[in-house]
Image: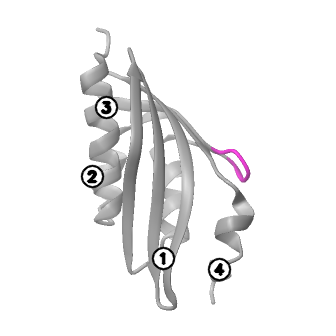
Amino acid sequence: MTTSPASALETVRAFLSAITAFDYDAAMTLIAEDCQYENMPMGKAIGPAGVRGVLEPFFSPTLENEFLILRELTDGKTVFTERLDRHRLATGWVELPVAGVWEVETGRITVWREYFDAATILSKWPAPGA
């Protein structure tokens, strides 16, 4: 079964919506067991446990998330997003321009790569445990 561009985009949007709501359980149902998630400046995680292991601690200081999709393009099972990721911390909003590349098979994300300037976010993000 092939993934249509519309269903691939719907999967990515549903994933981002679940993360916006901090609903990690729902979000992980959209991640394939062998999903390769890579924050290009930071490293790679595999599968739902790996993805959750990166996202949940990272967003722990976040009071609110917004993932504003500026542009999106699909080509078969591949989705490209240009976003402005906004995170409200106790000290205020932090904004990060992000480009994402996603591949979706049968309703699950199999590849997710994020491209952003790590210094932009890390200079404003609290240290783990802070």
Question: The magenta stretch spans which residues?
Answer: 39-43
Question: Who comes first in sequence, dot 1 or dot 2?
Answer: 2
Rendered position, 92 above or below 7: below
Q: Please state which amino acid type lies under the numbered disc 1.
A: Ser
Answer with mark 2 or mark 3, whichever residue precedes in sequence.
3
Q: Which amino acid does the dot numbered 3 rest on? A: Leu
Quarter of image, res 86: bottom left
Amino acid at pointer 4: Pro
Mark 3 or mark 4: which comes first in sequence? 3
Residue at x 63%, y 90% (from the top left corner): 130
Q: Give the mark nearer the N terminus: 4 vs 2.
A: 2
Q: Name the disc covering residue 128, or none.
A: 4
Instruction: Verify CB contact (< 8 Å) between mark 4 and mark 2.
Output: no
Residue under label 2: 26
User: Crowding near pointer 2: few (<14 within 10 Å), some, many (20+)?
Assistant: some
- Total marks in image: 4
- Of badges 2 and 3, nearer the viewer stands 3
Give the vertical position of 123 relative to 11 (above or below).
Answer: below
Compared with 71, 130 (above or below) is below
Q: Which residue is mark 3?
A: 9
Real-space Cα separation, disc 4 to disc 2, in angstroms: 25 Å
Percent x, y for residue 39?
Answer: 64, 48
Q: Quadrant of residue 45?
A: top right
* Quarter of the rendering occupied by the N terminus: top left
Q: Which residue is mark 1?
A: 60
- Please name the residue shown 32% across and 10% down the image: 2
50 or 74, nearer to the observer = 74
Q: Is residue 33 magenta?
A: no
Q: Earlier in the sequence, mark 3 or mark 1?
A: 3
Looking at marks 4 and 1 on the same chain, the residue that comes earlier in the sequence is marked by 1
Residue 55, horizontal then vertical, whole percent: 50, 60
